[in-house]
Structure formats: structure tokens, C-alpha cells
Amino acid sequence: MTSVAANETGAVFTSPAFDRHEEVIFYTDAKSGLRAIIAIHDTTLGPALGGCRMWPYGNEQEAITDVLRLSRAMSFKNALAQLSTGGGKSVIIGDPERDKSETLFHAFGRFVENLGGRYIVAEDVGTNVDDMSHIRSQTSHVMGFSARQGSSGDPSPVTAYGVFCGLKAAVEFRLGRVDLAGLSVAVQGIGHVGYQLCKYLHEAGAKLMVSDIHGAAVARAKADFGARAVAGEDIYSQDVDVFAPCALGAELNRRTIPQLKAQVVAGAANNQLECAEDGAKLAERNILYAPDYVINAGGVSNLSYERENGYARDQAMAHTARIYEITLEIFGRAKREGRPTSDIADDMPQELLGAHS
Ligand code: NAD
């Protein structure tokens, strides 16, 4: 395995996504074809915890930008979720459908092991519990591997529960509704989290509109929840109460925000705002934005209940339910200060981290 200095590979320090990251490490492994980057953003509260994303990035700079943004969001997410972990993230450049192998995840596991516990890996988009089990053969600094091996398994159902709690807080704050029966929600991306979120919403009596680039995911939501299918980009302009982005990032931008008819945005996707100003654009349109890393923290909270004597699911769910109060606190402060909710969500963890350093 070869370690490559960051500045030989692409712009890191001059990237707009760079924000006082402690460490950015590049790895390659010729045998497996692994090309990976780990970014450790902040370890003030503890070792950096964050998922490993596998994605066919168009170029290296896209991968660097993604890992820088995602790792910073993990610092903020973990701090706000009151966890004793810092923020980090990793990316593997490759197509998860085509390029995965045990050897590749073994090499990645050795990479994580080399960091001596400063980074703890878990799954993210493009990786799953089986991949984490392969990584575990090389390092103990991994969470969310198979439940059969005593871990917490797939975090997505707990993430979805947290998103549901945050969405309820937003609906109550913006629409004055506690009962979700009849609420209309457009969900973009019916993957691991999106599907489970639809389940919670359906059980609460909400009406669902869904879109996904995979027809099978849409067909399943139609069959299981009576959801109405919406074609691709039309999901933004649906006449609904809530828009729930549960696909990839940067879906809220200068092109899509003007199309929104929803009064609330609350979803699972990481990095929903393409740039910081998009938070202000939503506020200007009087759309209440439930900040992504606040309401999607259920999965990482879940990981922190992996204990030596097993996984404590009830405690993980109770911890995740706190997202409702934290989200309301952010909305209250945003209203008092006349500022976008996204700005408040950035300030609060920085205040917490500042108090500890
Ligand atoms: P996933 O890969 O299982 O699901 C994503 C879904 O979005 C897929 O079905 C995909 O086909 C669909 N999709 C992609 N692009 C789309 C587009 N343009 N329009 C419509 N659908 C599209 O991933 P996931 O685990 O469900 O995660 C979803 C989001 O939530 C990601 O941004 C992830 O980073 C974030 N997140 C996930 C967790 C977790 O526990 N899994 C935790 C925190 C945050």
C-alpha cells in the first residue's frame, strides 16, 4: 500500500471545502485497485467517526471535495448529537456495482488500521455491512458490521427514525401540525433510509410522492405504501407540505430552490445545500429547512451504542429521539436571531467544540 502526499494529488488546502481539517490521507493499493481518501476533520471530542462512501467520482477533485465536506459535517453532526466522537469520513473512488472485492476492503482495512484508531469507519452510500465485515478482518476500528457478529448492523432504520423525528419537529414548527395524517411529502431517493422514512410516514397517515433513478425502488414504495411515482426532476415542484431529499447531496441549489412548493425541507441526504448561501435562499422563500446533519444523526448515534457486551438498541432509539428537541431548539434560535436554520446549525457545534478546546 502506498501513501501519497495530498498536494501531489489535487487541491486540498485551497479547496473551498477545506476548513481546518486535521488530516487528509490518500491511499492506493495496486493489487486490489483501491484508491481511497480519509479526511479527519476534528478530533476535539474523540476519535473521528464517519462512514466510507464508494462512488464513481468523475475526477479526483470531486472525491476530495466530497470527503472534505462530508468529514466536516460529521464533526458538526457528532457534536450536536452529543457523542464523544470527532468527525471524519472516507471515500473510495470506484463503482460499487463493479469494483468491489474482498481484497479491496481488506486493503482499506489496513489503511484504517495504520491510523491507529484516530479514524473509525462505518458504512455509507455504496458500502454495506458485508464490506464492514471484510474491513473488520484487518482492523478493530470499524463499526456497523454484521449484526450476526454482535454489531448494530445496518444503521439506516435508525437514521430514518431520526429523520422522522426532525421532520415532525419541522412540521409542528412551520405548519402547527402534530398529527401527520394527510400530510403530503415528496421523497427523493427510496434507498435504505428513504424507504424506511416512507414506512414511518405511511404509518403516520402521510400521503407520499416518490422518485428514484431505480424503477424497482419506486415500484416497491408504490406497492408497500400506496405512494405516487413522480418522474425525476418533477419531484422538486410537487405541491406538497414537505420535500424530503434522501438521495445524494447538493439537491438544494439555485436551480431547484425556486421550484419548491413545500413549506418544509426535511430529509436524510448529507450535504443537501449546494453552497452555504442556499440556506439563506430557503429562508428568504419562507421554507423551513431542517439541517441535514442534525436530523440524519440517528445512524451515527446508533453506532455509539455498540458496546463490548453487545448493542443496546432501545438506548440508541431513545438517544435518536432527542433529534426532535435539538431541531426545535435550532428553529427557535433561528427565529429569534432572524437567521437561516443552516447558519444556526453550523454555529451550535462550533460553540460546543470551542468550549472543549
Ligand atoms: P442508498 O444508496 O441506499 O439510497 C439512495 C437512493 O437514492 C438510491 O435508491 C438511488 O437510486 C437514489 N438516487 C440517487 N440519485 C437520485 C436522483 N437524482 N433522484 C432520485 N433518486 C436518486 O443510500 P442511503 O443509505 O439510503 O442514504 C441516502 C442519503 O442519506 C445519502 O445522502 C446518505 O449520505 C445519507 N445518510 C445515510 C445514512 C444511513 O444510515 N444510511 C445516515 C446519514 C445520512
Image (tube, rainbow, N blue to C red):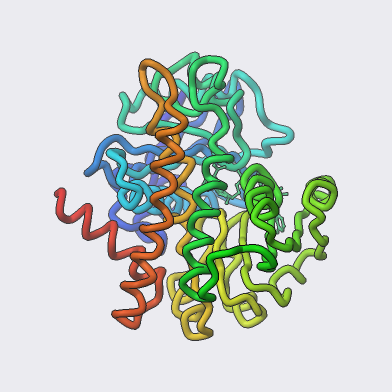
Q: Is residue 69 above or below residue 192?
A: below
Point out residue 279 in the picture as x, y percentages from the top left corner.
46, 74
Image coordinates for residue 91, horizontal then vertical, percent: 51, 41
Asked whether the viewer can see residue 100, the reply is yes
- Observer-nearest of 224 and 230: 224
Residue 156 appears left or right of 113: right
Q: Say which quarter of the image contains residue 39.
A: top left
The residue at 41%/26% (across/down) is 306
Q: Position of residue 309 (x, y in %)?
A: 38, 16
Please tell me whether residue 328 is drawn above or below residue 214 in the rendered image: below
Q: Can residue 247 be seen at all in this image of the molecule?
A: no
Q: Nearer the viewer, residue 133 or 202?
A: 202
Residue 90 at x, y percent in the picture: 47, 39
**Residue pictured at 45% horizontal, 27% vertical:** 143
Residue shown at the point (46%, 72%) measured from the top left: 173
Please name whichever residue, 291 or 330, is drawn nearer the observer in this view of the structure.
Answer: 330
Occupied quadrant, residue 258: bottom right
Residue occupying the point 33% across, 52% down: 80
| Total marks placed | 0
Residue farthest bottom in this picture:
284
Is 335 on the left-hand or right-hand side of 226? left
Residue 277 vertical placement versus 33 (above, below): below
